[in-house]
Amino acid sequence: MNESIGELIDICSGTLAGVSDSPRLDCQLLLGHVLGKGRDWLFAHSDEPLDCRAKHRFTELIQRRQNGEPVAYLIGKKGFWNREFELSPSTLIPRPETELLVELALARFDGQPRQVLDLGTGTGALAVTLAAERPDWQLLAVDIDKEAVEVAQRNAADLANININEGNWFNGITQVFDLIVSNPPYIAEGDPHLDALAFEPAQALASGADGLDAIREIISHASDHLAEGGHLLLEHGYDQQATIVQMLDDAGFTGIETFEDLSGQPRAVLAKNVRSTRDDDE
Ligand SMILES: C[S@@+](CC[C@H](N)C(=O)[O-])C[C@H]1O[C@@H](n2cnc3c(N)ncnc32)[C@H](O)[C@@H]1O
């Protein structure tokens, strides 16, 4: 049967109804990806038929979506802030809640030259966005995953003020920063939510028995890499804020502020380093 574009979208939206919260949008994005067209084009050409090859490719993608594979992996990209990010199975899909860190960094720190570090950069969502928004900042971003680093480097290809390296948190970093940002893995191993995230890399999501291993590691070494008066900005799980505030306090940070995401969930902390890196040498 040779359905029109509009009919095919209707049929496949029904197929995805039990799988996705946005079945129609998913179908439009997947068909748009197959045809290399935007949603406006699909709408304007909804009465036209689809050729057999395109229909075959679209049907394959719908089947993979039906099996739970996220649209972002199927089309290989995701919008974050005001840019489109390439992604791969080795990178986390950038989340809208992580835009809170961008908002905070831009609201709290003006455009004067700053050294900024992004730990666990994934697609580069945070570091690339900050580098694009603040041309006078110099960004260093690291990730332990080689393939993620390559993806992030491609996402940063148009920017001169960012370097992206493979690395294990602060290992090998000798520089001192004005701002460290991180959206590290923070889900507890064994958390049932991980089942629904099976297509995303475990290394990007889970972090020890309580989900706090990465955050503990970052907080315990951050002062060594922050200028006196420099700041640490972290994303965290909705139920981790009080524990993290205590960790920051114990580590000697001051001016600790807490923030909620757009859903009203506790999601980020900002803290100021008072220790001079020279203290260690005295
Ligand atoms: C939650 S994802 C965040 C990705 C990206 N910053 C974002 O917000 O979309 C955490 C990232 O930390 C990286 N990661 C995990 N362990 C790491 C380590 N020991 N050192 C550096 N990066 C690490 C993962 O590979 C993953 O890309």
Image (spheres, rainbow, N blue to C red):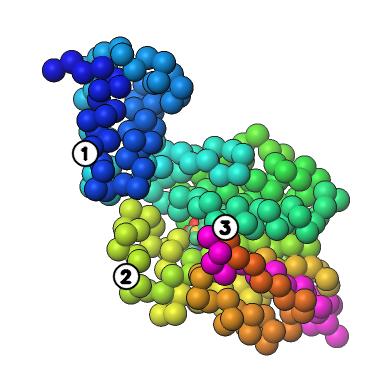
Left or right of 187 in this view: 83 = right
Residue extending farthest top: 48
Q: Which residue is mark 3?
A: 262
Residue type for callout 3: Leu
| Residue 13 % position (x, y) | 27, 35
Residue type for callout 1: Thr
Q: Which residue is mark 2?
A: 192
Residue at image position (51%, 70%) is 238
Q: What mark, if any, has residue 191 been given in the picture?
A: none
Left or right of 57 in this view: 126 = right
Q: Which residue is mark 1?
A: 15
Residue type for callout 2: Pro
Is the C terminus in the top left, top right, bottom left or bottom right quadrant? bottom right
| Residue 266 % position (x, y) | 57, 69
Viewer-proximal residue, 16 or 250?
Answer: 16
Sequence-earlier tag: 3 or 1 = 1
Q: What secondary structure is marked by label 1?
A: helix
Question: Is residue 228 in view from this perspective?
Answer: yes
| Residue 150 % position (x, y) | 51, 45
**Residues in magenta?**
263-282
C-alpha gap between disc 3 and disc 1: 30 Å
- Residue 262 falls in image quadrant: bottom right
Q: Does the magenta portion include 281?
A: yes
